[in-house]
Image (cartoon, rainbow, N blue to C red):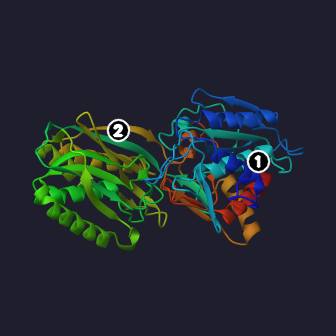
């Protein structure tokens, strides 16, 4: 056991988490972690199958005397979001996650931790391995590509599972039982831009950094800055006040993460450098004032860069920059039925340029299909007015809450018996695989719970160690009651 996890309980979970942290497992690159799970199942003498998408199902007999209990499935995803701070030397294809413990929290050193969904997968492996938990017949479902496209869950076929109950282990708020989630889709806006030779002058790299970022569903209502939009506003200010040319753009890294960093390459006469820096400094001050305590560490920097050969024609650059600065990001509407729940939102996720094509990717979410389509049309219309061609993909369904189902009632009873209080029933403004898998299993009752995980999808990701112990205690108690 590493020094970060030495002596930390429950060892049943943390030993598996440490093993997972050593295995690269980016989305669509889960082969090594899949082999790890299959090897453990084989060592335990359990039946396992792998479907065409790469998902795993492992089956385990009931504890003696509980053979007649309904089949229960534990479900989690094998992949993780791969984000690192600029300047962090790390290769997600080869390097193990470097674990760091600070009091009651576990972090990674400069990267995402993978507690989403590594803790849930580790708990499932611990149940697989246990010979003391008095559970009924079990199925363990390990899916792939959850963080990028939900491809594993989307390709999970009907008839594979026998489970009456399914517990998703991908909830990230302790003391809550999740009983519903939003559906979503991605919107790709592309514009072919005219390129021309760069004027004589100096090149500058304008960089936005220091933002918190976070999960585009879970954190979308927190008022955090969006690096793509901030960059767009900074470029607007420059192009409106100086003769300058735009040469390159890049920002964000994933459709489901609020972008933390973005940059652009500008070309302008060296005589304008002082004014350029003053314009950017004033804009940065304005945005810091606007964000306030929501995101206080924003930085916008200017430094010399290698001079490019080509730049974007001014008219096209202005269209691109205006869209970046004005495209809606954040909450469209709050739920009228569940206090504090975001109903509809959009996240401006990434901007990039390749071969003369600028692409802006955003994602829309809603638990209501019609509302999701309205958000999609609003974003598409804005992009089309700026001369972008629009394509939608990755549509996935939500999960309708069923607060009176048996699994919710029994889980609530266990919680009340353990803690003397009623758990908070929530629905998440994020895509959970329960919604996708549930389409093919309409009679299956589902619930989701987990430990306290904060800042997922960013290098500030952390999991509360004590909450993992409580999560394990609750999970095993629920399994013995179902």
Badge 2 marks a residue whose secondary structure is: strand
- Asked if the residue under mark 1 is in contact with the one under mark 2, i.e. CB atoms within 8 Å, the reply is no
Q: Residue at x 73, y 70 (%)?
A: 419
Tell whether 83 sits left or right of 229. Answer: right
* Residue count near mark 2 (Cα–Cα under 10 Å), binned few <14, some 14–19, many ≥20: some
**Residue 471: numbered disc:** none
Pointer 1: what residue?
127
Badge 1 marks a residue whose secondary structure is: helix
Circle count: 2
Q: Earlier in the sequence, mark 2 or mark 1?
A: 1
Residue 162 is at least partly visible in this image: no
**Residue 407 pos. (x, y %):** 69, 53
Q: Residue at x 58, y 36 (%)?
A: 30
Residue farthest toward the right in the current orientation of the protein: 65
Q: Residue at x 60, y 52 (%)?
A: 98
**Quadrant in the picture for residue 288:** bottom left
**Quadrant in the picture for residue 416:** bottom right
Pointer 2: what residue?
392
Of badges 2 and 1, nearer the viewer stands: 1
Tell whether 384 sits left or right of 472. Answer: left
């Amino acid at each position: 056991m590493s020094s970060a996890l030495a002596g930390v309980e429950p060892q049943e979970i943390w030993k598996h988490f440490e093993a997972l942290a050593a295995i690269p497992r980016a989305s669509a690159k889960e082969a090594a972690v899949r082999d790890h799970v299959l090897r453990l199942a084989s060592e335990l003498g359990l039946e396992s199958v792998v479907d065409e998408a790469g998902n795993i199902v492992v089956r385990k007999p009931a504890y003696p005397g509980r053979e007649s209990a309904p089949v229960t499935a534990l479900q989690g995803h094998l992949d993780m979001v791969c984000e690192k701070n600029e300047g962090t030397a790390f290769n997600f294809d080869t390097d193990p996650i470097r674990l760091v413990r600070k009091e009651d929290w576990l972090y990674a050193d400069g990267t995402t931790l993978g507690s989403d969904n590594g803790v849930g997968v580790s708990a499932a492996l611990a149940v697989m391995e246990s010979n003391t938990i008095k559970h009924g017949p079990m199925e363990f479902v390990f899916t792939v590509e959850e963080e990028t496209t939900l491809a594993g869950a989307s390709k999970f076929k009907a008839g594979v599972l026998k489970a009456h109950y399914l517990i998703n282990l991908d909830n990230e708020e302790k003391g809550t039982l999740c009983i519903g989630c939003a559906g979503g889709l991605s919107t790709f806006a592309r514009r072919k831009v005219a390129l021309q030779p760069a004027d004589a002058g100096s090149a500058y790299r304008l960089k936005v950094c220091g933002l918190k970022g976070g999960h585009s569903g879970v954190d979308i209502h927190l008022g955090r800055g969006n690096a793509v939009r901030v960059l767009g506003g900074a470029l607007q200010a420059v192009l409106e006040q100086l003769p300058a040319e735009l040469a390159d753009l890049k920002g964000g890294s994933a459709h489901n993460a609020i972008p933390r960093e973005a940059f652009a390459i500008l070309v302008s006469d060296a005589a304008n450098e002082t004014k350029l820096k003053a314009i950017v400094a004033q804009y940065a001050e304005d945005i810091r004032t606007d964000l306030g305590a929501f995101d206080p560490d924003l930085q916008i920097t200017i430094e010399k860069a290698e001079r490019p050969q080509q730049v974007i024609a001014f008219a096209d650059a202005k269209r691109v920059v205006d869209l970046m600065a004005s495209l809606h990001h954040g909450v469209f509407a709050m739920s009228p039925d569940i206090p504090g729940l975001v109903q509809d939102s959009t996240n401006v996720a990434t901007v990039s340029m390749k071969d003369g094509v600028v692409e802006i990717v955003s994602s829309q979410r809603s638990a209501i299909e019609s509302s999701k389509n309205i958000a999609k049309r609003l974003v598409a219309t804005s992009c089309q007015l700026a001369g972008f061609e629009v394509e939608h993909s990755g549509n996935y369904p939500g999960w309708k809450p069923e607060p009176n189902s048996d699994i919710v009632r029994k889980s609530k009873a266990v919680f009340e018996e353990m803690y003397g209080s009623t758990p908070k029933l929530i629905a998440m403004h994020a895509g959970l695989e329960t919604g996708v898998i549930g389409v093919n299993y309409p009679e299956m009752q589902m619930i989701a719970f987990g430990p306290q995980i904060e800042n997922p999808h960013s290098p500030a990701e952390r999991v509360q160690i004590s909450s993992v112990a409580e999560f394990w205690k609750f999970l095993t108690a629920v399994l013995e009651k179902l």
